[in-house]
Image: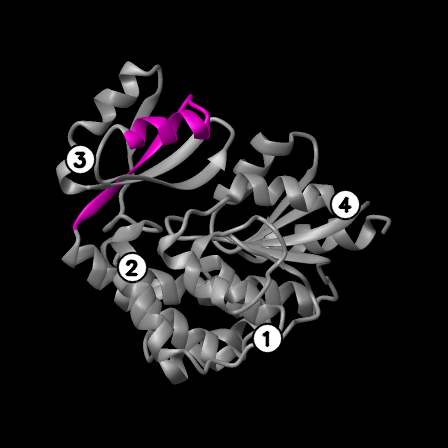
């Protein structure tokens, strides 16, 4: 076996009951939720019992996913599993940085709480939506977006899948334009045009409020959303808010660094499915409950390093 990367899940992967089994079977995971409740009371209850409507609210989604992602990673670390590299999709990058020792846990969690609040505010102030464009390369999607004001390619997920943020004014005409160019636009259930200029106010507020946030080079390299390369500094944490997520490039670069085993830590298998489509035959595991934790531990422990 080559090198191992932990991938921290992003927004959209949340579900009712997430993290509950991890908290029951892992002391380290339970401590993550206890910590979160000491800063943001009720966070664990939202993860374990929150309704779909409650969890889809950005102000709840991001803090809750932060906790479940981190709890899954800590449960693995508790069992002696250590990654060579880390990465997280959008908000998942923050628990990745906390796990890697770049940002103190308390500061990272307070940052994610404000990140969620300010992004939600932007979504209300500058209403928008997002579409997953299927069947077209990124450069083709960029050309389509250049034909309409208020359309921004923001998530480069796969070679033939790019997510686009649209203003309300441009959203109605965008799917037809995509169809005219041979692609398909699928509307996503989100509350704003994330990772686009519509989020600039959120970035500005975060940069001002967290200008003195602690940051140091961690022991485990983290790959950044904004470049697809190894993290270069704290400013990328703010830049990510209104910049595209270069996920396809990031996964290819992890593979070039010798990673052939990917472990998604957090709810669902969205990132796992992306890795499979990007790289094909690599080992892909996920950890979101007791069963998946045990399976990952067994496979990683028994594999030759």
Going from N to C along the chain, the mark reached first, 1 or 2, is 1
The secondary structure type at the circle numbered 2 is helix
What residue lies at 74% left-to-right and 48% top-to-bottom?
299
Q: Residue 248 in the image: x percent, y percent?
A: 54, 38
Q: Which residue is mark 2?
A: 200
Which one is in front, 290 or 195? 195
- Mark nearest the camera among 4 and 3 is 3
- Report how far apart the C-alphas of labels 3 and 2 lie in the structure: 19 Å
Q: Residue 237 in the image: x percent, y percent?
A: 47, 64
Is 136 within the magenta? yes
Q: Mark 2 packing: few (<14 Cα in 10 Å), some, or many (20+)?
A: many
Q: Mark 1 packing: few (<14 Cα in 10 Å), some, or many (20+)?
A: some
- Residue 172 seen by the camera: yes
| Dots 3, 2 in contact, CB < 8 A | no
- Report how far apart the C-alphas of labels 4 and 2 lie in the structure: 35 Å
Q: Is residue 215 above or below residue 288?
A: below
- Report how far apart the C-alphas of labels 1 and 4 lie in the structure: 32 Å
Q: Which residue is mark 4?
A: 258
Q: Which residue is mark 1?
A: 27
First to last magenta residue range? 127-146
Q: Residue 175 in the image: x percent, y percent?
A: 24, 25
The secondary structure type at the circle numbered 3 is helix
Q: Which residue is mark 3?
A: 170
- Report how far apart the C-alphas of labels 3 and 1 lie in the structure: 48 Å
Going from N to C along the chain, the mark reached first, 4 or 3, is 3
Q: Is 198 left or right of 61, judged from the image as shown?
A: left
Going from N to C along the chain, the mark reached first, 3 or 2, is 3
Q: Is residue 35 above or below residue 285?
A: below
Going from N to C along the chain, the mark reached first, 4 or 2, is 2
Q: Mark 3 packing: few (<14 Cα in 10 Å), some, or many (20+)?
A: some
- Report how far apart the C-alphas of labels 1 and 2 lie in the structure: 39 Å
């Amino acid at each position: 076996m080559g090198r191992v990367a932990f991938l921290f899940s992003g927004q959209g992967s949340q579900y009712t009951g997430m993290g509950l089994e991890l908290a029951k079977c892992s002391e380290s995971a339970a401590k993550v939720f206890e910590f979160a409740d000491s800063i943001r009371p009720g966070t664990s209850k939202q993860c374990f019992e929150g309704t779909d409507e409650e969890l889809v609210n950005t102000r709840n989604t991001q803090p809750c996913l932060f906790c479940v992602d981190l709890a899954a990673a800590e449960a693995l670390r508790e069992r002696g599993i250590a990654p060579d590299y880390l990465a997280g999709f959008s908000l998942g990058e923050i628990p990745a940085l906390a796990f890697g020792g770049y940002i103190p846990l308390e500061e990272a969690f307070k940052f994610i709480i404000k990140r969620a609040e300010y992004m939600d505010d932007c979504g209300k102030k500058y209403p928008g939506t997002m579409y997953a464009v299927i069947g077209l390369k990124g450069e083709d999607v960029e050309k389509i977006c250049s034909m309409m004001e208020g359309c921004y390619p923001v998530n480069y997920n796969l070679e033939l899948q790019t997510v686009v943020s649209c203003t309300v004014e441009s959203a109605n005409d965008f799917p037809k334009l995509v169809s005219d160019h041979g692609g398909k636009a699928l509307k996503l259930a989100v509350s704003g045009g994330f990772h686009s200029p519509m989020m600039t106010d959120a970035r500005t507020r975060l940069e001002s409020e967290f200008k003195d946030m602690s940051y140091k080079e961690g022991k485990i390299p983290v790959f950044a959303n904004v470049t697809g390369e190894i993290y270069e500094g704290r400013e990328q944490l703010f830049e990510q808010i209104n910049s595209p997520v270069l996920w396809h490039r990031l996964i290819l670069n992890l593979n070039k660094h010798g990673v052939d085993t990917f472990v998604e830590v957090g709810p669902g298998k969205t990132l796992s499915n992306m890795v499979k489509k990007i790289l094909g035959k690599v080992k892909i595991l996920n950890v979101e409950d007791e069963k998946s934790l045990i399976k990952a531990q067994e496979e990683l422990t028994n594999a030759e390093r």
